[in-house]
């Protein structure tokens, strides 16, 4: 479903903006958010323009990383960024899996 991929694309762009706006004080967190935002946006754009389950699964994996990143990287003093990463990670993961599971029926030409 293209709409889910475009929502994930927007969330990827959001992660890039958040990396510069909120996480500038902690360089490792800033770098992680910008890189994962680029990955999510690029993979979601691929999934939207050329629907494939592989691209959607990769978007879901990027969402999973976004969700668990606060446990792997020190977000000391960045509670807003930590909360943002958890929420965006859950949404990207759920939409990526839903986009993978959702299949349109094949169209036959008569």
Image (cartoon, grey):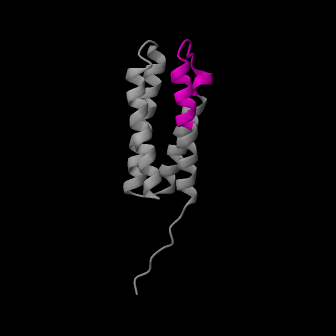
Regarding residue 27, the answer to whether it shows in the image is yes
Viewer-side residue, 6 vs 41 = 6
- Work out whether 54 lies above or below 77: below
**Residue 6, percent from left and from top:** 41, 49
Q: Is residue 9 above or below residue 80?
A: below
- Tell me: 98 left or right of 17: right
Classify 110 as above or below 24.
below
For image coordinates 52% across by 29% down, the residue present is 84
Residue 19 belongs to magenta span: no
- Asked if residue 38 can be seen in this view, the reply is no
Q: Quadrant of residue 31?
A: top left
Q: Quarter-wise, where is residue 73 in the image?
A: top right
Residue 107 location, quadrant: bottom left
- Where does residue 32 sit, x and y in percent of width and height? 47, 25
Q: Could you tell me which residue is drawn at 44 percent across and 15 percent down?
A: 27
Q: Position of residue 37 (x, y in %)?
A: 43, 34
Residue 75 shown in magenta:
yes
Please name the predominant secondary structure of the magenta segment in the image.
helix
The C terminus appears in which quarter of the rendering? Answer: bottom left
Stretch in magenta: 69-89
Give the residue displayed 58% in from the left and 24% down from the top. Answer: 70
Q: Residue at 58% of width from left, 58% of height from top?
A: 101
Q: Would you say 71 lies left or right of 6 here?
A: right
Name the foreground residue: 3 vs 62: 3
In the rendered image, residue 104, in percent from the top left (x then y), is placed at 50, 67
Query: Please, is residue 34 above or below residue 110 in the view?
Result: above
Near-viewer residue (82 or 56): 82
């Amino acid at each position: 479903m293209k709409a889910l991929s475009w929502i994930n694309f927007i969330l990827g762009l959001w992660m890039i903006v958040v990396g510069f706006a909120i996480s500038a004080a902690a360089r490792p967190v800033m770098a992680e958010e910008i890189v994962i935002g680029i990955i999510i946006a690029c993979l979601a754009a691929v999934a939207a323009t050329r629907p494939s389950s592989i691209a959607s699964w990769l978007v879901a994996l990027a969402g999973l990383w976004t969700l668990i990143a606060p446990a792997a990287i020190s977000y000391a003093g960045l509670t807003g960024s930590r909360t943002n990463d958890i929420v965006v990670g859950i949404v990207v993961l759920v939409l990526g899996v839903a986009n993978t599971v959702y299949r349109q029926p094949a169209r036959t030409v008569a």
